[in-house]
Amino acid sequence: MSGTAEPIDPVSVTPTERAQPLRTAGFRTLLEALDYAAGAGTGVNFYDGRGRLDRSVTWGEIRTEARATGERLASLGLPRGTQVGIIAETHVDFPVAFFGCRFAGLTPVPLPATVHLGGQRQFVDLLGRMLSNADARVCLGSAAFASFLDAMPGADELAFSGSVETLLHRDPAQLPEAPDPGELAYIQYTSGSTRFPRGAMLSERSTLRNVYAIIQDGLALDEQDRFCSWLPLYHDMGLVGKLIVPMVSQASIDYLGTREFAMRPRLWLRLLSEHRSSISFAPPFGYELTTRRLREGDAADLDLRAWRIAGCGADMIRPETLERFATALAPAGFDRRALLPSYGMAEVSLAVSFTPPGTGMRADTIDLHAHRPPEPGQAAPGRTTRFTRCGKPLPGYVVEIRAEDGSLMPERREGSIFLHTPSTMEGYYAAPEINAQILKDGWLDTGDLGYMVDGELVITGRRKDLMIVNGRNIWPQDVEHVAEQHPGVRTTDAAAFTIDTEDGGSLLVVLLQCREPDEEAREQMLRAIRRDIQAEFGVEARVQAVPPHSLPRTTSGKLSRSQARLDYLASLAEQGS
């Protein structure tokens, strides 16, 4: 299915045109859901970087091509359950290969499709390491990634490495028995924001349990809903939320490539407007980038009245980010009640909690030290007291906030977030020691910190990101926010972390991607940021300018503070040698 077809009308089926009733539960496996979706007449539309329709396929066509791909994979004679790496490009070849693996009784492993500024060498090295970590025996991609696959370390040791188009040249073989609900549906690699990515193993049963909860309770989907997405398909929000959920609910979805969104974020809004899409999600930086790129008058040319769920999920969501977005798009008819913060992670397939649809983003203002809201008329003590509520846990999903000794924390007391869910992963692939640490008696230690208020979950950060300087607990994102308030500094331009000092203490370091060409003006800005950090947190900081686009990112585009710290320490070692 590689190549570009002549532009055609996008797949778009109204409720009265559906060939069968909407069904949102009762499937035992993903392929059973795909079989049903194949008869709905709905499907997937792929758009290019100019917003032009590049490819349109129904779920039925995807099923046909996936089955053919599965027959070719079966010809390789691999043991059932063998891992297959798939470069998760926003291209029709990805869903074809993903579901083709399940037809062949193999386990798909989505791999990043973004070549960052490090270039091809860094990208193929990462692919090689992830394939090796997953013990994959096959690696597939679209024709556009054929050269990367050829250059990948260990490619000659695989049973097959190449494009889906090349694979289809093989003679077909008989498909094995249909998947069992207890089999692995896929291995989802985490973004690796604090470590090398780890592969979460999700079964067919667990995945569908989470998907049903998302469809029925989180989003309250109906036959009129239409999705739109630019999210990468190798990330859980893209794979589960914007491929598996639309397929299981027999909905249509419009795709814009992640790279194309980053270059022209207004295209996202244009697709939403033109197709009257009702559901689309993005992490906070997506909303921030889109708001920043809007020009005067842009919003008035859009019609976003149909957008009923503007979802957002991340480790921590700043209320200000969503508020600015809603205000900027009010002239387009965007209803701020569509904002829907949520919480989830790949380790439970995707979702844990949702803000009720139609209620909008709600913030909680709190003094984390006193564990209560500020007194009436009293200013909030510091900038770090306003957090986004991420809604109540899905039915059957239990959240506990625990202290370091394991005891339960009362309301508005920050602690570690533990989960007991019907969709928790089997564990990380080939990581028994880590699994023993984070999976105990059916509970998952998420590594996140937060608190509960009125039965709703509030995320305050990642436990490993928390910095302790002079006995004070300081969040890196709070320090970064102070830096980002200065003119010329954009969101995600700063990275804060600590390093050990010779006297056994900790030094706060802030790396700032700086676009100011004038050296004197740049130094003035760095001094001003140091002063603001000192005034806000009572600690001194080493603030250092680095070139634009030099801060490391994870495969999902998140800032990797841990890698920034390692890179900084390596640079200090080089200077001292």
Image (cartoon, grey):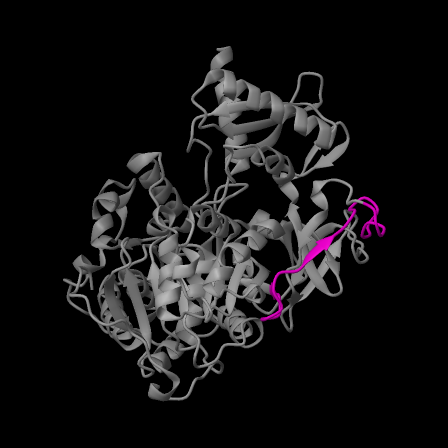
Asked whether residue 525 is in view, the answer is yes
Camera-side residue of 176 and 147: 147
Above or below, comparing residue 271 to residue 538 in the picture = below
Camera-side residue of 523 and 71: 523
Q: Residue at x 73, y 65 (%)?
A: 455
Left or right placement of residue 16 versus residue 202 in this view: left
The N terminus, quarter of image: bottom left
**Residue 428 coordinates in the image, percent (x, y):** 52, 53
Camera-side residue of 89 and 190: 89
The residue range painted magenta reads 353-378
164 is within the stretch colored magenta: no
**Residue 499 coordinates in the image, percent (x, y):** 62, 25
Camera-side residue of 451 and 529: 529
Q: Residue at x 52, y 62 (%)?
A: 311
Q: Residue at x 67, y 24 (%)?
A: 531
**Residue 401 coordinates in the image, percent (x, y):** 74, 56
Count of numbered circles in the view: 0
Q: What secondary structure characterizes most of the magenta part?
A: loop
372 is within the stretch colored magenta: yes
Asked whether residue 427 is in view, the answer is no
Q: Residue furthest top?
A: 577
**Residue 156 coordinates in the image, percent (x, y):** 23, 44
Left or right placement of residue 163 versus residue 13 in this view: left
